[in-house]
Image (tube, rainbow, N blue to C red):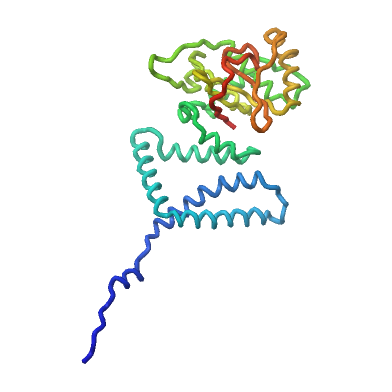
Amino acid sequence: MIKIKEINFQGIKQRFRVKKPWDDVMIFILNILIAIPLFIIVHQNLINPNWFLNIDRVVLFLVMIVVIQIILRFLRTIILFCIILYLLVLIYGSTIGNYGFNSVFEDYNSILYTMSDNPYPQDIIIAKLLPFPNKSKIINAIEYQNPKIRNFAVMATTKHFKDIKGYSDYRTIIQCFAVFKEINSRWNYVSDPKARDYIATATESLLYFSGDCDDHSILMAAAVKSIGGTPRLIHTTGHIYPEILIGSQTDLEKVNFLIKNVLFVNESNENKLHYHVDERGQIWMNLDYTAKYPGGPFMSEEILGALTLD
């Protein structure tokens, strides 16, 4: 009598289960998106041995891809759930006109662009992650690539300090001080509506040079950045104001002389400069709307947050 063995269909299904290719594709794409900015950070912070054809950097990037892929595959279920949830949020945001796919694409490109030119690219990521009131609205409002902002800044540089000679190393800072002079000489403080924080774009504020402290900071940061300066916004209790990167202590000494003896002689007469020194020893000078000269007195000393726009 022939015995027919029971077929283990469950085992066959398990053995020949068809894998879903889309989840591997999503994991790999996420891997690349994470690996590129991490590679920039590691590349900028490691000594370059200058191997032939930069083989060391190629190997480094490949190793990072492998390591990240292993980690992501280990956390596959959680990550896939988060990706799907994030995509749903972006679809909803794109549908109603808020933060959506286009915004993510622009932010990612912006991060990579600024990281590639920054000696401390990790600061760009940290600045994106740190809390700051109305951060996304403020970043979007700083329209430094808008031709109107650029044209205004160029106009200011032709109107003020155009004939200053002998300070070629500080030309950009001098031109940014020209922007400061033009904006602050025309700025009219106007409060936001009651019980609402209105964030005006740089081009809005350019129409009448009016608004509150965050509107002034946005316009100043946009105009300064549009001509090559490095601005940041400082958040204190109930106030936001802009600062500009000066550089080292030696740079501060040169800028101090320029402000007090060449550019803002009357405004800065017998007054001291106000600035902050960050954790890397870089000096940032106050450009608040209340200041009559760069480095004028602070309205508030306590820093609750900083938003760097490098």
Residue 114, given in percent of the width and then of the height, sits at 58, 37
Residue furthest left in the image: 1
The residue shown at (75%, 13%) is: 261
Residue 154, given in percent of the width and then of the height, sits at 61, 21
Screen quadrant of the C terminus: top right
The residue shown at (71%, 8%) is: 269
Number of numbered discs visible in the structure rendering: 0
The residue shown at (64%, 47%) is: 43
Q: Relative to 277, is 86 above or below? A: below
Q: Quadrant of residue 182?
A: top right
- Asked if one can make out residue 281 in the rendered structure from this viewpoint, the answer is yes
Residue 272, given in percent of the width and then of the height, sits at 70, 14
Residue furthest right in the image: 166
Residue 130, given in percent of the width and then of the height, sits at 52, 33
Q: Quadrant of residue 181?
A: top right
Q: Quadrant of residue 246?
A: top right
Q: In front here: 92 or 76?
A: 76
- Asked if one can make out residue 159 in the rendered structure from this viewpoint, the answer is no
Q: In front here: 297 or 109?
A: 297
The residue shown at (51%, 10%) is: 188
Screen quadrant of the N terminus: bottom left
